[in-house]
Amino acid sequence: MCWAYLTRQNIGPSPIFLRRNGCSARGLLSSGRAVVSQISSNPPHAPTMPPRLNIWSACQALSVRPRSIAQWPQQCAAAQARGFANDRNTTSQRFPDQNASNLPPFAISLSAQVPAASENEIALSQLQMAAYGLDPFDSKVDGHKFGMPDLPLPRDLNHKHRYDPVVVQITKLLMRDGKLSKAQRDMAMILNYLRTSPPPKINPARPLLPGSPAPSQLPLDPVLYLTLAIDSVAPLVRMRAYKGMAGGGRSLEVPMPLEARQRRRTAFQWILDVVNKKPTKGSGRAMFPNRVAEEIVAVVEGRSGVWDKRQLMHKQGTAARANLNHPQLRKKGQ
């Protein structure tokens, strides 16, 4: 029954194998019992049992080979001695028991080679602070890269005022229906268009503000690009009408000076009027910002019609400057 079970389970040797090799079942009774004991402890369907075994592999699997237990090595003293070059810990803290017999001799020699904080690093840090324009020997700056702010803090130091004032004003002028996030996205697209555009070609007949950088430097600073375009085309005066003061029901036109924010607002409103009159080239989020950026580039290059509006406004102001001495205005001023 033993050999029949082994043969049926494809584990033991078949009778044909025994007859060919001149073996008898009585001679292999001891090995057969060992195989049966292995089957009882580890069934044939277990994943550790191979699908087919012969008598030699069964005996080899059951053989016991004594082996010494491998011991894990302890942490090397060199690994304990690792640290940074500017570590202020003493070698006695790294090796609290240097005189013990369990430390190898190379560990003691390694601890003596660990360098302390050198004066060169302190000198380099002082030179770096001096490069930032700070006093390296100031007690307020010690431990800080840029130093502590002066107290009391200024009133305009607020997170809401972290952007350039021109960018904030133009963003508010771009806003429609209170959608500030959309206006900020449009402003980001405008600045990105100015940054990636080629250098503009300046028209000598319509120059920019005096002291402006070279045209090749404008795309490197899109905020300066935008500010220079708006300030160059911004009018200096506006015309104010006094009704019925000129006589016969006519209004008296008087030029009035503008502040910086008023000049920029008027110039950008002119730019938006030109942009809204142009036909659209398609649809999408980037269509309107791209048209505004193209008009800003045209203003810098002198191709925009905003220059004509500025020139007309200045002509009207020059022609009506005599109205500033009108007697009605003098009485009103008194």
Image (cartoon, rainbow, N blue to C red):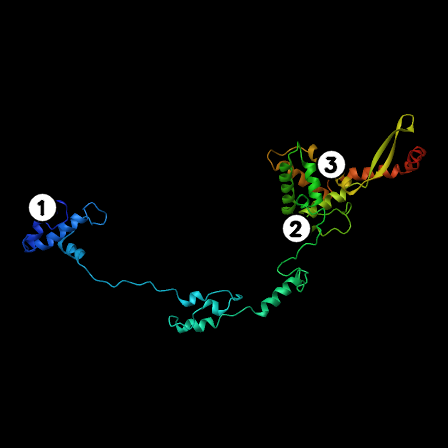
- Residue sticking out furthest to the top: 249
Q: Which residue is mark 3?
A: 269
Q: Left or right: where does residue 49 sit relative to residue 199?
A: left
Q: Which kind of residue does numbered mark 2 sit on?
A: Leu
Check if mark 3's residue and mark 2's residue have beta carbons within 8 Å. no
Left or right of residue 60, residue 86 in this image = right
Residue toward you, 75 or 126: 75
Q: Which mark is residue 208?
A: none
- Residue toward you, 3 or 176: 3
The type of residue carrying mark 1 is Ala
Residue 330's quadrant in the figure?
top right
**Which residue carries the number 1 mark?**
4
| Nearest-to-viewer mark from 1 and 3 | 1
- Judge by depth and name the residue closer to the eye, 109 or 99: 99
Residue 200 appears anywhere in the view: no
Of the two numbered discs 1 and 2 on the same chain, state the one appearing first in sequence: 1
Q: Residue at x 61, y 64 (%)?
A: 125
Mark pair 1, 2: CA separation: 91 Å
Residue on which disc 2 sits: 220
The kind of secondary structure element at disc 3 is helix
- Neighbor class of circle 1 (other Cα within 10 Å; few <14, some 14-19, many 20+) is few
Numbered label tally: 3
Residue at 67% in and 49% down: 221
Q: Position of residue 84 (x, y in %)?
A: 51, 65
Element type where label 2 sits in the image: helix
Which quarter of the rendering shows the C terminus?
top right
Q: Position of residue 85 (x, y in %)?
A: 52, 66
| Cβ–Cβ under 8 Å for marks 1 and 3 | no
Seen at 76% across and 38% down, the residue is 266
